[in-house]
Image (tube, rainbow, N blue to C red):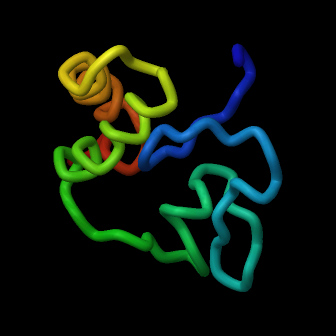
């Protein structure tokens, strides 16, 4: 996964074309997943902390982190580096 792109909003790995969202006019997004970006707009309007809470169960269920607290701690450290949250 060294060269894997990650959604710059939720950090989902982007490994297949169908996982990428779209910009205006249906152009594939280079930075965001299908769940976060559609037609050039974010699908969800919340804070970074709220996004982390949405993502915690998915990461634990996928085995990325052993438990919710580990997932939350890691994401709160990582998310500020993502494009969407870097200015927050």
Spot the residue most to the right. 17
Query: Who is closer to the viewer here, 1 or 83?
Result: 1
- Up the image or down, 71 lies above or below 6; here it is above
User: Which part of the image, by quadrant, shows the N terminus?
Assistant: top right
* Image x and y of residue 70, in percent: 25, 16
Horizontal side, residue 16 vs residue 50: left or right: right
- Up the image or down, 72 lies above or below 45; here it is above
Q: For residue 75, what is the image quadrant?
A: top left
* Image x and y of residue 4, in percent: 70, 27
Horizontal side, residue 12 vs residue 56: left or right: right
Query: Who is closer to the viewer here, 19 or 29?
Result: 19
Number of marks in the rendered image: 0
Spot the residue most to the front. 61
- Up the image or down, 79 lies above or below 53; here it is above
Residue at 21% across, 47% down? 88
Spot the residue most to the bottom. 25
* Image x and y of residue 11, in percent: 48, 38
Horizontal side, residue 17 vs residue 32: left or right: right
Horizontal side, residue 31 vs residue 48: left or right: right
Residue at 38% across, 50% down? 84
Residue at 55% across, 45% down? 7
């Amino acid at each position: 996964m060294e060269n894997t792109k990650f959604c710059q909003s939720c950090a989902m790995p982007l490994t297949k074309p169908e996982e990428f969202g779209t910009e205006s006019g249906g152009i594939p997004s280079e930075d965001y997943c299908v769940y976060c970006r559609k037609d050039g707009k974010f699908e969800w309007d919340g804070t970074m902390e709220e996004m982390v809470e949405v993502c915690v169960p998915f990461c634990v269920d996928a085995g990325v982190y052993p438990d919710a607290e580990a997932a939350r701690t890691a994401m709160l450290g990582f998310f500020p580096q993502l494009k969407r949250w870097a200015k927050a």
